[in-house]
Image (cartoon, helix red, strand yellow):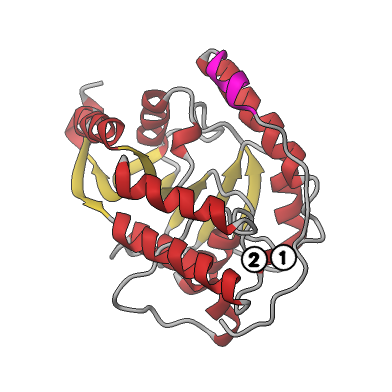
Amino acid sequence: MESKPQGKFTFECEDITPALRDSSSAGRNQVWKNWYDKLISQLGNSEYRFFNYGYLGQEKIELDPAEQDKRNFIELYQRTLGDTDLTGKDVLDVSSGLGGGALWISRRHRPASLVAMDLSTEAVNLCNEWYSDQRNLRFVVGDSESLPFPDSSFDVIYNVESAHCYGNFGAFLEEAQRVLRPDGVFCWSDFQSRSEMADIKSQFMDSGFTTVSFQDITEGVIRSLEFVRNGISEGTLDSNLFIWGGDTDSIQDVIEEFGDWRSYHCCQISMDSSARSSR
């Protein structure tokens, strides 16, 4: 990442913390939708293609030269997928955001089809404009807690750094089970407080999924955050690539939260066919 920094792309967003605190589960999802629609409506001319905090592992994945400045974002998707084979499969990206991860996966992992779904109409419209030439990729509007797909539609589902926004995580797990084919794989990553992460792991175990792995990847996420903080401070990174990266003090706050009370985990889990048949 040797690009010269550009001027910070500015946008306006309100603080929705009070609205989230006072909302029901359904109302919480609507608050997030309104917030993301307003944010993304301002991003059409920006360089942003990812929302996530990123991940930097000790072993680097191979990337094309044009992908190098997005390495930490892409590595989080690869870490989430693990060794899951997507070649020739029907794949669903739940909460696809600005679509950078879905584009990379559709090209590198060569699924037969990749449906990228997001609650934000603005995001879906923008992604369909940006990535229209990628034939095995399409973007649709949908709610993670009521997926707009028939039963047993996908071989692989993945969900990256978004479930902490969901009003009803259990409903999301039920929907993921419903649209996943027998012997399908669900790949997930996100951050939460350490106590809430323990509860999430229990929900996975109680939901009928078989956990292949559940791993703490906090150190790699912190490495990504430190890399961005240092690069922007030193002028070697373009802050336009990091929607959360213009204020290095805020990045430092997030790093300290991960060191103190937050954790970041990923897992690959499979569908227990016997559990499905008994429901």
Depth order, front residue of 35/134: 35
Image location of residue 106, percent across then percent down? 53, 65
The image quadrant where one finds the N terminus is bottom right
Q: Is residue 99 above or below residue 118?
A: below
Query: Percent position (x, y) of residue 145?
Result: 49, 27
Are the residues flagged by discs 1 and 2 in contact, CB closer than 8 Å? Answer: yes
The residue that label 1 is drawn on is: 47
Identified by mark 1, the residue type is Glu
SS for dot 2: helix
Q: Quadrant of the C terminus?
A: top left
* Residue 273 quadrant: top left
Task: Where is residue 235? Give x, y as percent.
Answer: 63, 77
Whole-number angstrom distance, CA of label 1 to CA of label 2: 6 Å
Seen from the viewer's position, the closer of residues 140 and 243 is: 243
Q: Which type of secondary structure does the marked residue at label 1 adopt?
A: loop
Residue pictured at 51% horizontal, 70% vertical: 230
User: Can you see residue 197?
Assistant: yes
Q: Which residues are magenta?
A: 16-23
Which comes before the other along the chain, label 1 or label 2? Answer: 1
